[in-house]
Image (tube, rainbow, N blue to C red):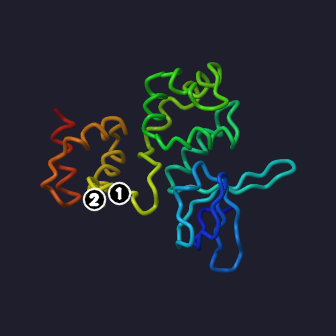
Amino acid sequence: MYEYINGLITNITPSYIVIASRSGVGYRLYSANPYRFEENVESHVYVQQIVRENDISLYGFIDADEKALFNKLLNVSGIGPKSALAILANGDAAGLIDAVSEDNVSYLMQFPGVGKKTAQQIVLDLKGKLDDLVDTGATPQTKRDSNHSQELEDALEALIALGYTVKDVRAVSKQINREHNTTDGYIRSALKLLVK
């Protein structure tokens, strides 16, 4: 089983990337949005191997959270790898997580191949099981946007680890006092907002 591959992205197509590992092997990794990766750039790509009766495929992800979300989608009856990638392709993991927690079936029905019955099944199977995931879908070079330092990201992940929901943490992340520039400072600022 593969966890990740470090290597040079040598080719990008509409449905997959090719990453050349340091051992000289080129791996084809199907991806929700291959264009989030950059060609001729050394990358750290998370990988999931799917073995079927007549096929072995590798799927590549920007980060471990995107990979985890992909695997959780695969546990939903009626969702296969292709459908899971289509759902992840819009890059709005936060919207997906919110839709599941709020029973927003109409939001889920906007994805290709997801009808009302499948959308309801997604809610049924995943409700309460996505709170441990943080927002995914950033590009490797801009994973932390200009308003989110590494310290702030670490603080948000720590709050989730403490048991706060992703939705609550995301809400307070917009209100945290930006004068704090340490992880501890961000956590203290967020906790003041969360315990009100």
Q: Residues within 10 Å of mark 1 (few under 14, many from 20)?
A: some
Q: Give the numbered dot on residue 73.
A: none
Measured as percent of width and height from the top left, residue 176 is found at 19, 45
The amino acid type, in three-letter code, at marker 1 is Arg
C-alpha distance separating marks 1 and 2: 6 Å
Q: Residue furthest right?
A: 54
Looking at the picture, does residue 55 appear above or below residue 102?
A: below
The answer to which image quadrant residue 192 occupies is top left
Q: Earlier in the sequence, mark 1 or mark 2?
A: 1
Hey, which residue is sitting farthest bottom in the picture? 23
Residue position for label 1:
144
Determine whether, in the image, residue 178 is placed left or right of residue 32.
Answer: left
Residue, x 28% and y 56% (percent of image)? Answer: 146
Tag 2: amino acid: Ser
Determine the residue located farthest toward the left in the rendered image: 179
Q: Which mark is residue 149?
A: 2
Label 2 environment density (alpha carbons within 10 Å; few <14, some 14–19, many ≥20): some
Residue at the (43%, 24%) spot, across then down? 102
Instruction: From the viewer's side, name the closer residue of 106 and 123.
Output: 106
Q: Secondary structure at mark 1?
A: loop
Say above or below: 55 vs 96.
below
Whole-percent x and y of residue 136? 45, 48
The vertical placement of 24 against 157, above or below, is: below
Q: Are circles 1 and 2 on residues that touch, CB within 8 Å?
A: yes
Residue 111: name its quadrant. top right
Taking depth in this image into account, of 108 and 133 the one nearest to the observer is: 108
Give the left or right position of residue 107, taking residue 160 as reference. Answer: right
What x and y, as percent, mark residue 66?
Answer: 52, 49
- Tell me which residue sits at (63%, 61%) in the image: 12
- Residue 63, percent from left and from top: 50, 56
User: Element at badge 2?
Assistant: loop
Q: Residue at x 47, y 31 (%)?
A: 128
